[in-house]
Amino acid sequence: MLISLIGSSSHAQDHNYCHDKKSWQEWDELIRKNYHDMDIQFLHAVRIGFCEKIEAGTIEFDTAREIFNALHEKVLEKAQKEKQRMLENSEL
C-alpha cells in the first residue's frame, strides 16, 4: 500500500510531492483508513515535517527525500517481518 504513494520510478523519486494535491489526498485517505497504524502515522508526520522544513529552507529536498525513503524502507521491512511472523504462527 505504501509503495504506491512513493513510486518506484526514478522520476517519482525526484518529484517533490509537498505541493502535490493528489498526493496529499492519497495520504489523507490512507490515514483515514488506517488510523491506528502507527507506522503510517509516523511516515505521515515525517512527511509533513519534511515539507515544512523544505519550505523553510532548513533542509534540502534531496536530503529529506533520502531520509524519508530510508524510513519508508524500514517500515516496509518491519511490515514484511510481521506478516511472515503471523504466517508462521498460523501454521503452528
Image (cartoon, helix red, strand yellow):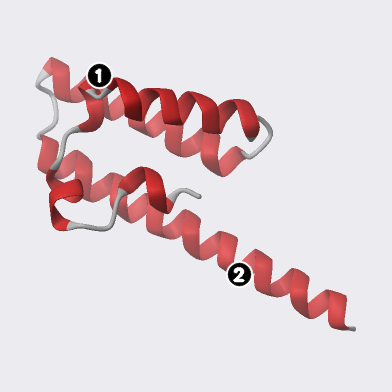
Circle 1 packing at 10 Å, graded few (<14), some (14-19), many (20+), is some
Distance Cα–Cα, label 2 vs label 1: 32 Å
Residue 39 x, y percent position in the rendering: 55, 43
Would you call the spot at circle 2 few (<14 residues within 10 Å), some (14-19), or many (20 or more)? Answer: few
Q: Which of the 4 quarters of the picture holds residue 37?
A: top right
Disc on res. 52? 1
Location of residue 43 in the rendering, given as x and y in whole percent from the top left corner? 44, 38
Q: Is residue 11 above or below residue 33?
A: below
Say which of 59 and 91 sits in front: 91
Looking at the image, which residue is at 56% across and 29% down? 31
Residue at the location (30% across, 20% down)? 21
In the image, what residue type sits under mark 1?
Glu
Residue position for label 2: 81
Left or right side of 58 for 46: right
Q: Is residue 63 above or below residue 47?
A: below
| Residue at the image position 90 percent from the left and 83 percent from the top | 92
* Amino acid type of the residue that numbered disc 2 sits on in the rendered structure: Lys
SS at mark 2?
Answer: helix
Instruction: Please identify the quarter of the rendering in which residue 46 is found.
Output: top left
Which is more N-terminal, label 1 or label 2? 1
